[in-house]
Amino acid sequence: MGSEGAEAGTVRPGGRTARVRASVLRAAGDALAEHGFAHLDLADVARRAEVGKTTVYRRWGTVTGLVADLLQDMAEQSLPRTETGSLLGDLRANARLVQRTLADPRQGALFKAVIAAATGEAKTAEALHRFYDVRVREWAPCVQQAVDRGEAPEGTDAHEVIRAVSAPLYYRLLTTGAPLDEAAADRAAEAAAAAARAGAYVRGGEGRT
């Protein structure tokens, strides 16, 4: 699928321009983490990345376009799923990956900024939804494999199980201020695994025990 007609910020550069893109996206992430979405400025990002302002304006066009590309890059650069051979093991690996990301000072602040922006900016919300869709689809096969092994009932919604793993961790990040440690990640994984085994995520309620 080509890039003709693509929205600003979605065209994927290659070759020598890839280094410029990487530098600009890194600078954008730093600026978001430091000052939030409201103070994100394309000229400041260009200065941080040590590239011309016209390059940034021409390629990304708007702050929203830049954030959309940043989220796309983050999704692509995220680690692939871990398959341990058990539902709990896989969900624990997922939870600990989310925990490490959100507990990182830069990454945690970056996600807070983007989530806050998404509550009032439709295009940022769309970009954030795409990011999470990519990550959920990456890990969902772990749940389907568990169903195939008989660890969870047929009809289990794999995507909902993966979402259930990270939900408590994001809640901590955004509302409680409680530590985001491995113990919190393990509890989230254990709760999601137990609910999945009990049939809580079976589509339409079929097969619940």
Image (tube, rainbow, N blue to C red):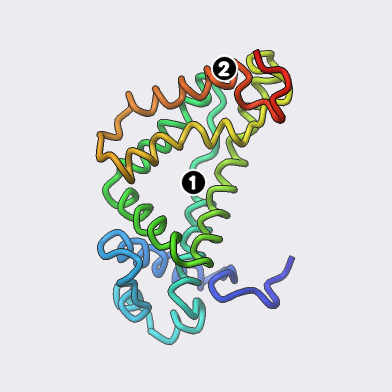
Of residues 154 and 45, the one drawn nearer to the viewer in this rendering: 154
Q: Secondary structure at mark 2?
A: loop
Q: Label 1 near label 2: C-beta < 8 Å?
A: no
10 Å crowding of disc 2: few (<14), some (14-19), many (20+): some
Give the residue displayed 68% in from the left and 72% down from the top. 3
Q: Given the image, on which type of amino acid does mark 1 rest?
A: Ser
Q: Is residue 8 left or right of residue 176?
A: right
**Vertical comparison of 39 with 77: above or below:** below
Question: Which is in the foreground here, disc 2 or disc 1?
Answer: 2
What residue would you read off at disc 2? 86
Tell which residue pokes out farthest to the front in this image: 205
* Label total for image: 2
Q: Is residue 165 left or right of residue 41?
A: right
**Vertical comparison of 24 with 106: above or below:** below
Query: Residue 25: horizontal and vertical position, in percent?
Result: 42, 65
Of residues 108 and 3, the one drawn nearer to the viewer in this rendering: 108
Q: Given the image, on which type of amino acid does mark 2 rest?
A: Ser
Residue 198 lies in quadrant: top right
Residue 145 lies in quadrant: top right
Query: Residue 24: horizontal and vertical position, in percent?
Result: 40, 70
Which quarter of the figure is the C terminus placed in? Answer: top right
Give the residue displayed 39% in from the left and 41% down from the top. 170
Q: Which mark is residue 101?
A: none
Give the residue displayed 68% in from the left and 77% down from the top. 5
Q: Which mark is residue 78?
A: 1
**Vertical comparison of 139 with 13: above or below:** above
10 Å crowding of disc 1: few (<14), some (14-19), many (20+): few
Which quarter of the figure is the N terminus placed in? Answer: bottom right
Tell which residue pokes out farthest to the bottom in this image: 54
